[in-house]
Amino acid sequence: MLATDSDPIVAIATAPGRGGIGVVRVSAGRAGAAGAEALMQALTGQTLAARHASYVPFLDGNGEALDRGIALYFPAPHSYTGEHVVELQGHGGPIVLQLVLQRCIEAGHAFGLRLAEPGEFTRRAFLNDKLDLAQAEAVADLIEASTEAAVRSAGRSLEGAFSRDIHALVDDVVTLRMLVEATLDFPEEEIDFLEAADARGKLAHIRAQLDHVLAEARQGALLREGLSVVLAGQPNVGKSSLLNALAGAELAIVTPVAGTTRDKISQTIQIEGIPLHVIDTAGLRDTEDEVEKIGIERTWSEIGRADVVLHLLDARTGMTADDETIAARFPAGVPVVRVLNKTDLTGVAPAVSALAPVEGDGLREVRLSAKQGDGIALLRAELLRIAGWQADAQSVYLARERHLIALRAAREHLAQAAAHAEQNAQSLDLFAEELRLAQESLNSITGEFTSDDLLGVIFSRFCIGK
């Protein structure tokens, strides 16, 4: 813990702007119960009953009422931060809240009350063992969730579902480590440890459980981050029409004139609760128009950052030489869906088909009519397939890229442990070391093994007052 982690802190805990109710929150830190009581006396003129809502005036330095509202006192350790907490719930005008906040700082000057930094209340909750790190991150994810599915998944993480699965994995790894290291301590015991203790079977079970947790976490990361989908192709193949069809609104200008879209147009839509950040870009072609050239450069920049590229073609002409040139420049490893638009002009029904196998699980082709809306559902389903989404995934918890990196690292260490296990007792020391590294990776998710630098990065992204 840093020296400042025990400072008394205060902040406005509600969003900026005007509202019916505004909350000012104080966590007393090292000032303890005495500091909380002094603040209550200065602000309300009385000592508040624990966990009881009291309708009181909020007093200025002269004893005049700044506002009237509900005051609450939560003694440690039964509070959000685990410290003595006072909350003042008054009217939500920005000026009156600032006045109450300033009065708190004045009244708490004697014991060092200061403004809280972003995420500092939740950081206190983590440091005081009220939440583990995965649950603390879920607080911010719940606030920022943009879909119902993301809200429910963040709620599961906050309730501890993700943490429980991680702790179960760690417990299994620790149990296996104890068996391995006990054998290392008694090398004179001439037994085949790997066979007698079924170490390989235990390790296989741990790896299977980790794969399950990783799959759920990937789903959660999709709910949190979404998928970046770039519409690319030659001018006048219907990219803007497809964006409008996916979004269900007229977002982009649609004309028969090639090159109408000069710059990217972005829209976030939802499919099964997954945010899709769809980007309509300038048509790709050779041009002397300087403005259009800039738009084309930006198109390639967006393609380079895409999670999925929808390569639009005119269904009447199919794949032309120019389209082949465009396809050759797509980044390796990025899924590409070939979309043949304007099927309403060909008489061919909308459909999805697999083409010649390429890197990954193969190139797929979707035939549709953006103008008529035929086949849009097929494209949405294809995007979900690429994302790896399972419609019946009820146990998903929201996860961050940090969690996925840690889970993948743990999986790699367990794979190395399995390789050493195949070499039997000659590699038991390396087996034990890989298990230790896997445990450290898993512990970093819940914060049992986490650097102060990482904590600073995580909590600095929270809103002030949370």
Image (cartoon, rainbow, N blue to C red):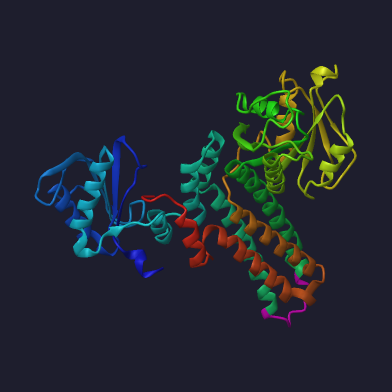
Magenta stretch containing residue 259, yes or no? no
127 and 186: which is toward the camera: 127
Please provide percent x and percent y for residue 134: 52, 53
Q: Quadrant of residue 430?
A: bottom right
Please provide percent x and percent y for residue 302: 68, 45
Q: Residue shown at 9%/50% (left/top)?
A: 62
Q: Quadrant of residue 271?
A: top right
On the rendered structure, is 52 left or right of 279? left
Q: Quadrant of residue 205?
A: bottom right
**In the displayed structure, would residue 82 be above or below residue 341?**
below
279 and 367: which is toward the camera: 279
On the rendered structure, is 372 left or right of 93? right
Where does the N terminus fall, quadrant-wise? bottom left
Please provide percent x and percent y for residue 148: 53, 34
Please provide percent x and percent y for residue 335: 77, 43
On the rendered structure, is 464 left or right of 237? left
Bounds of the magenta segment: 185-193
Camera sees residue 50 = no
Q: Residue shown at 55%/52% (left/top)?
A: 164
